[in-house]
Amino acid sequence: METPGASARCPLQEQRARWERKRACTARELLETERRYQEQLGLVATYFLGILRAKGTLRPPERQALFGPWELIHGASQELLPYLEGGQWGQGLEGFCPHLELYTQFAANAERSRATLQEQLKKNRRFRRFVRLQEGRPEFGGLQLPDLLSLPLQRLQQYENLVVALAENTGPNSPDHQQLTRAARLVSETAQRVHSIGQRQKNDQHLRRVQALLGGRQAKGLTSGRWFLRQGWLLVVPPRGEPRARMFFLFSDALLMAKPRPALHLLHSGTFACRALYPMAQCRLCRVFGHSGGPCGGLLSLSFPHEKLLLMSTDQEELSRWYHSLTLAISSQKN
C-alpha cells in the first residue's frame, strides 16, 4: 500500500531540494576554503613580503618580480570574505570579478618569479638563510616558498569549480542567480586565459631546453616560434646498411632529426647537431607494421616531397605515442 508521504512528493520539489543541498554544501566549502586561503595570503604578506621590505634583503624590483601582485590579491580576498560570511554570494562574487585581472597578471609573472627565486637562492646568501628560517615556521605547515607562491593559481582553479557549481545549483528565481551566472562565466574565462598563459610558458621552457641541447648558432632559428610536442630516440632505417639511432624533436610544424656530437667535443659535448628539418605540412604518415601489439616493435613511414623516412622502435608503445603525436602535428597544419 502506498504511503501518504510518497503520494504527496513532487519531482520538482525534490529537484529543488537537491539543488539547495548542493548549493549549501558548495557555499560552505567556498567560505571555509576562502578563510584558509586568506590566512595563507596574509602569512606570506607578513612573514615574507613585510620582513623582506623592512630588512631590505631584496631590492624592490627583485621583490616585485618574485611576488607580483600578491598584496593586491590578498586585499581582494579580504574584500570578498565578509560577503561570503554574510551569505551575500552573488553580490560578493560579482564585486570580486574586477579583481580577476590580478590572477592573469600573477600567471603572466610566474616564469619571471620562478627565475628570480632560483637566482636569489643561488646568489644571495642572506635571502637563502631568510627563506629557510621562514619556511620553518609552524604557521606554514611544512610548505616551502615555491609551494606558497603557487597558491593563487591553485585558488583560481578552486574558484572556477566552486563558483560554477554554486551558479548551477542556484534556481533561476533566486535573487542572486544572474550575479552568480555572470561571476561563473568571468571566473571560467579568466581560468582559461591563465591556463593558456601556463601552456605558453611551459612551451617556452621546452624550447629553451631544446635550444640548449642543440647548441650552435642555428639552434635559436630552429626552435623559435614553434610548439614543442615530444622528443626521443628512434632508429632511422636506410635503404642499405644498418639502422642508425637519431634523436628526434617534434614541433607543431616540423620534425627535427639530430645526431649526438662527440663526447670529447671541446665546446658542445653532450649536445646534438641538426641533420634535417622536415615540414609536417608536407608529410604523409603510415604505419608499416606494429599495429597489433607484441614484442617486436614497429616501423613508421614518413613521406616528404623529396625524401622518405623509415623510423623504427623496438618499443611498440613508444612508437604508438610517436604515431599519435605525428598525426596531431600533421592535422594541425592542415586545419
Image (tube, grey):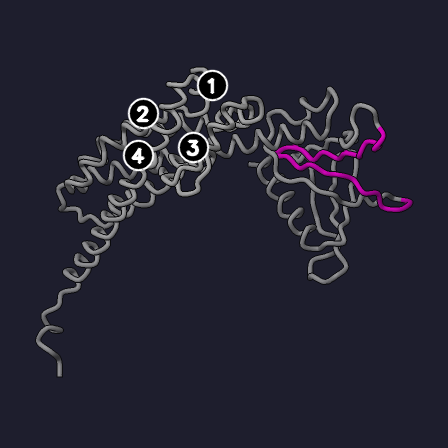
Q: Of label 4 and label 3, which has the lower sequence position?
A: 3
**Is residue 34 rendered to the left or right of residue 137?**
left
Q: Is residue 258 magenta?
A: yes
Q: Which numbered disc, 2 or 3, marks the residue closer to the eye?
A: 3
The mark found on residue 134 in the picture is 3
Residue 284 lies, with reference to residue 266, above or below; the image says below
Whether residues under marks 2 and 4 lie with C-beta atoms below 8 angstroms apart, the answer is: no
**Furthest-bottom residue in this view:** 1
Secondary-structure class at tag 1: helix
Q: Secondary structure at mark 3?
A: helix
Gap in Å between the C-alphas at discs 2 and 4?
Answer: 19 Å
Kindly indicate whether the residue at mark 3 contacts the one at mark 1 (C-beta within 8 angstroms).
no
What range is drawn magenta here? 240-264
Please, what is the three-letter code of the amino acid marked with disc 2? Leu
Q: Of marks 2 and 3, which one's residue comes earlier in the chain?
A: 2
Q: Amino acid at mark 4?
A: Leu
Residue hosting label 1: 62
Foreground tag (1 vs 2): 1
Q: Are marks 2 and 3 in contact (CB under 8 Å)?
A: no
Q: How many marks?
A: 4
Q: Position of residue 90 (x, y in %)?
A: 19, 38
Look at label 3 and name its amino acid: Gln
For disc 4, the neighbor class at 10 Å (few under 14, some 14 to 19, many from 20) is: some
For disc 1, the neighbor class at 10 Å (few under 14, some 14 to 19, many from 20) is some
**Residue at mark 1 to residue at mark 4: CA–CA distance:** 31 Å
Where on the picture, by quarter, is residue 209?
top right
**Sequence-first tag of 1 and 4:** 1
Mostly what secondary structure, the magenta segment?
Answer: strand
Residue pointed to by mark 2: 72
- Measuring 87% from the left and 44% from the top, which residue is drawn there? 239
